[in-house]
Structures are given as C-alpha cells and as structure tokens.
C-alpha cells in the first residue's frame, strides 16, 4: 500500500509518519529539545538528550529508505534532508562545547566543513547535479553520531566511560569530516571552475 492510497484516520497518520519529508521535519523539531535538555545538564537530562538525539538520528535512515522505496524523492528532500542532519549535529556539538565537554576547535572544523559543503550542495542542485552522499560522507555521519551519543550521555554508567568512548569517535569524526569535505570539493572542482 502506497502513501497516497492509505485510508482511514489511523492509516493516514501512519502513512504521514512514513513520509520522508515528515521524518526530515521531525529531525529538525528534535533540535530545541536537545538544546533545552543541555542547558542545565545532569544525569537524567543528558541521558534524555542522548535518547532524543538517537531517535532523531534514526529517522535519517528511514527517510531515505522510504523516499527510495516509494519513489518520493524530491528537491525539497534533497535540500532539507542534509540541512536537517546539519542542524541536529550542529546543535548537539554546540551544546557539548558550551559545557566544555568537547574542544571548541574540533567543533569549529566540523561545523565549518558542514556549512561549506551545504552551500556547495545547494549550488549543485540548482545546476541539476547529483548531490547524493559518497561513502566517505556516510562514514562521516556514522562517526559523528557514534561520537555525539556517548558524549551527550557524558556520565559513567556501569563503570563505562561514555565520555571517553565519545572522544575516541570524535577524533574519527574529525578525520572523516575533513576527508569527505575535501573529496566533495575535488569531485566538483570542474563545475566550480566553469562558474
């Protein structure tokens, strides 16, 4: 049953939550919640922030899955999906920096790359170029999520140093972020020269 053919109020609601653009907007809506929880962090709040971030990050997989499965890919999705990712990741990193839990210079490099590539992606969409993420970009997202979740938890549970685990993944995220950013600009340098 496709989204367009879903009937009944329950079916419409279920279909609505399977629409890729809805999942993208859910990711954006999670950002204020993470910020509020991290304003006065303690063990319950940071754990809830990590849960909220995890749930929002999971939608990133499903919106792409539903878009491909149902043939619902759109220019809105191509632009807003990566933007939602950037907002989610950026807000988490900024709040972690505000608490002094991650080095500011690392976050500046990561977010600087994200803004530069987002600008390039929007430019490429206008020129009808394929802006789908490379395998480097997918690894980059994986490392960033793997870093942010334990860093948000921060406090040790069952003698597990979540902050230490997050820091290890943060270094991996930094390497993959810079590498994938350079790769993105190298792939499209020919088009940039023509403008």
Image (cartoon, grey):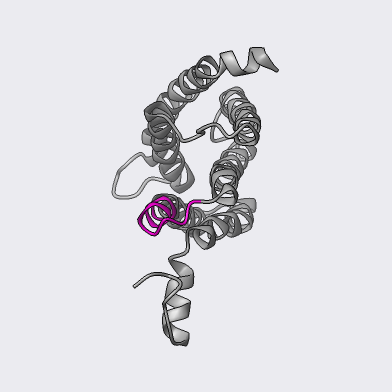
Establish if 62 lies above or below 188: below
Establish if 167 lies above or below 71: above
Question: Is 137 contained in the magenta span?
Answer: no
Q: Nearer the viewer, residue 11 or 157?
A: 11
The quadrant of the image that shows the N terminus is bottom left
Q: Position of residue 84 (x, y in %)?
A: 57, 48
User: Splitting the image into 4 quarters, where does residue 149 fall?
Assistant: top left
- Position of 109 with respect to 138 (left or right) is right
Q: State the count of labels.
A: 0
Q: Nearer the viewer, residue 129 or 120?
A: 129
User: Splitting the image into 4 quarters, where does residue 191 fall?
Assistant: top right
Q: Position of residue 125 (x, y in %)?
A: 60, 36
The quadrant of the image that shows the C terminus is top right
Q: Position of residue 140 (x, y in %)?
A: 43, 31
Establish if 193 lies above or below 30: above
Residue at 40% from the left image edge and 25% from the top image edge: 172
Q: Which residues are magenta?
A: 62-73
Could you tell me what secondary structure mostly forms the magenta stretch? helix
Residue at 54% from the left image edge and 44% from the top image edge: 78
* Residue located farthest toward the bottom when viewing the structure as drawn: 8
Question: Is 72 contained in the magenta span?
Answer: yes
Q: Nearer the viewer, residue 124 or 128?
A: 128
Residue at 45% from the left image edge and 33% from the top image edge: 133
Q: Position of residue 19 (x, y in %)?
A: 47, 64
Q: Nearer the viewer, residue 146 or 184?
A: 184
């Amino acid at each position: 049953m496709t989204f367009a053919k879903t009937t009944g109020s329950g079916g419409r609601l279920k279909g609505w939550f399977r629409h890729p653009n809805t999942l993208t907007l859910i990711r954006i809506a999670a950002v204020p919640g993470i910020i509020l929880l991290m304003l006065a962090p303690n063990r319950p709040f940071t754990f809830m922030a990590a849960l909220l971030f995890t749930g929002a990050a999971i939608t990133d997989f499903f919106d792409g899955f539903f878009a491909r499965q149902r043939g619902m890919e759109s220019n809105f999705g191509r632009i807003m999906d990566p933007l939602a990712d950037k907002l989610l990741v950026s807000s988490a990193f900024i709040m972690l920096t505000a608490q002094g839990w991650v080095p500011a210079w690392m976050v500046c490099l990561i977010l600087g790359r994200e803004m530069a590539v987002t600008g390039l992606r929007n430019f490429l969409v206008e020129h009808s170029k394929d802006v789908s993420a490379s395998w480097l970009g997918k690894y980059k997202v994986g490392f960033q999520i793997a870093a942010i979740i334990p860093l948000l938890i921060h406090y040790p549970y069952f003698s597990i140093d979540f902050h230490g685990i997050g820091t290890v993944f943060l270094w991996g995220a930094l390497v993959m972020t810079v590498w994938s950013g350079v790769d993105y600009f190298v792939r499209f340098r020919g088009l940039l020269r023509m403008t």
